[in-house]
Image (cartoon, rainbow, N blue to C red):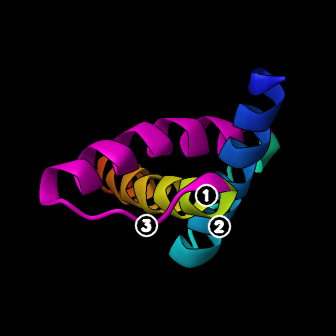
Amino acid sequence: MEILVTLIIGAAAGWLGSMIFKGSGLGLLGNIVVGIVGSFVGYWLLGEIGVNLGTGWVGAILTGALGALIILIVINLLFRRRY
């Protein structure tokens, strides 16, 4: 059951991060991966500066979205499309 909850939170966080960033879409699987990895980044970053966005699903989604946004910015900087 925890895997399903992790996937749902990861998908929601990745989708929210991609909506804020307005970059190219990564699809459902990409959003899940970016959201899950973003959750780790968000929790680490917010822990370092001493900020807590809450507990439960909402806090996890907001923290994951913040981390996903950071990951999307880094991905965009590293793999910028040159036309």
Quadrant where the N terminus is found in the figure:
top right
Above or below, comparing residue 62 to residue 75 in the picture: below
Disc 1 element: helix
Q: Is residue 79 visible?
A: no
Closer to the camera, 79 or 48?
A: 48
Q: CA distance from mark 2 to mark 1?
A: 8 Å
Residue corresponding to mark 3: 53
Where residue 6 sits, quadrant-wise, is: top right
Q: Which residues are magenta?
A: 29-56
**Quarter of the rendering occupied by the C terminus:** bottom left
Q: Residues within 10 Å of mark 2 (few under 14, many from 20)?
A: many
Q: Nearer the viewer, mark 1 or mark 3?
A: 3
Where is residue 76? Give x, y as percent. 40, 56
Question: Residue at left 26%, top 64%?
Answer: 51
Q: CA distance from mark 1 to mark 3?
A: 9 Å
Mark 2 vs 3, N-terminal side: 2
Image position, residue 22 (x, y; %): 58, 75
Look at label 3 and name its amino acid: Leu
Q: Please state which of residues 49 and 14 is positioned toward the viewer in this rendering.
A: 49
Which secondary structure, mark 3? loop
Q: Amino acid at mark 2?
A: Leu
The circle drawn on residue 61 is 1
Q: Residue furthest left?
A: 49
Q: Residue under circle 2?
A: 16
- The x and y percentages for residue 49 are 14, 59
Q: Residue at x 27, y 56 (%)?
A: 46
